[in-house]
Amino acid sequence: MKSILITGAAGFLGSHLCDRFIKDGFRVLGMDNLITGSLKNIEHLFGHPHFEFIKHDVSKYIHVIGELHYILHFASPASPIDYLKIPIQTLKVGSLGIHNCLGLARAKGARLLIASTSEVYGDPTVHPQPESYWGNVNPVGPRGVYDEAKRFQEAMTMAYHTYHGLETRIVRIFNTYGPRMRLNDGRVLPAFIGQALRGEDLTIFGDGSQTRSFCYVDDLIEGIVRLLFSDHAEPVNIGNPDEITIAQFAEEIIALTGTTQKVIYKDLPVDDPKQRQPDITKARALLNWEPKIDRAEGLKRTYAYFKSLTEEELRQTEHHNFDNYIQK
């Protein structure tokens, strides 16, 4: 039985990866310090004979007993509210954390896949964004701690690949949504749905003309798995190229939820990307991958998940100050 370590295992994407690799017959070690993750996301795996959870901060030395064949480094604050609140930890997990994971991969002879992000492209001047685009990032802006942590993570990973011959993979993840997102994480989709469920007005930052491209989580996980088992070491975009403006997206959420609340507009945060759309030519050619679940179906599944939350969980986000978040 092959063994895989998934860092950030209690997070949104990490927990779905744990499910996928358990289903595929792997021994899964899930690691998380729970700074933004939740054990609720993986509690259904507790007691499974092939799953083990380790509470640990990957910014500190990582020790794993026995064989290890694959490592997926998904530990990182990933929402604007989180990395604005814990900027130092965000930088450390993308620098010290990846260094520790790379060292472990080298010691075990394991293949390592890292979760990078479309944020490496910053506020892009090229549209859609291909992997060859170097980006337009402000390293000292409010988003810089996340953007530069991920850019450094890519550079460190490629250094180990070229210098040590380590088997590495880099996935650049575009906006992804689905069950297990946190309502109060500051991203536009849970923010809109949370506001609709609480009977609040939907808040748009800027004039709503900025665009995003939303990929359902099941499609993303499939792309990640295919990349892990490919022989391609360069970065690959995984996301849904179906682009939509934030204003149009707000109207879709209103129609989906049936809310009678209005849309209100506030100032656009600093360095908020005006456009975000993946060029997935490489993923199609190398991985034979493209998204299968359209936004209408994905939103229906996601809304059902959020509606299943308790009133207490909804109230936890009720007084959150969304004025300070950066819409992602």
Image: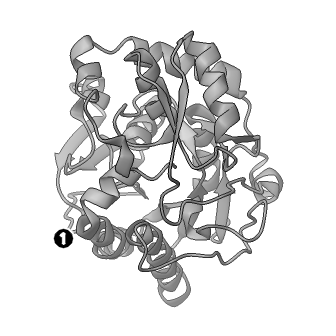
Please state if 78 lies on the left or on the right of 34 as rendered: right
- On screen, residue 136 versus residue 31, left or right, reads right
Residue 288 pos. (x, y %): 79, 47
* Residue located beneath label 1 in the image: 61
Which percent across, then down, holds residue 156? 45, 81
Query: Which image quadrant is residue 148 in?
Result: bottom left
Residue 309 vs residue 113, the one in the foreground: 309
Which residue appears at 59% of the width and 23% of the height? 253
| Mark 1 surroundings within 10 Å by alpha-carbon count, few (fewer than 14), some (14 through 19), many (20 or more) | some
Please give the name of the residue rendered at 24% of the width and 63% of the height, measured from the top-left corner: 58
Q: Please tell me which residue is depicted at 36% across the width and 70% down the height of the picture.
A: 94
- Check the image and report above or below for 71 versus 43: below
**Amino acid under label 1?**
Tyr
Q: Is residue 67 visible?
A: no
In this view, which residue lies farthest toward the bottom? 163
> Could you tell me if residue 52 is visible in this image?
yes
Asked if 23 appears above or below 173 in the picture, the reply is above
Q: Quadrant of the N terminus?
A: top left
Horizontal side, residue 314 vs residue 112: left or right: left
Residue 275 coordinates in the image, percent (x, y): 69, 56
User: Toward the viewer: 290 or 314?
Assistant: 314
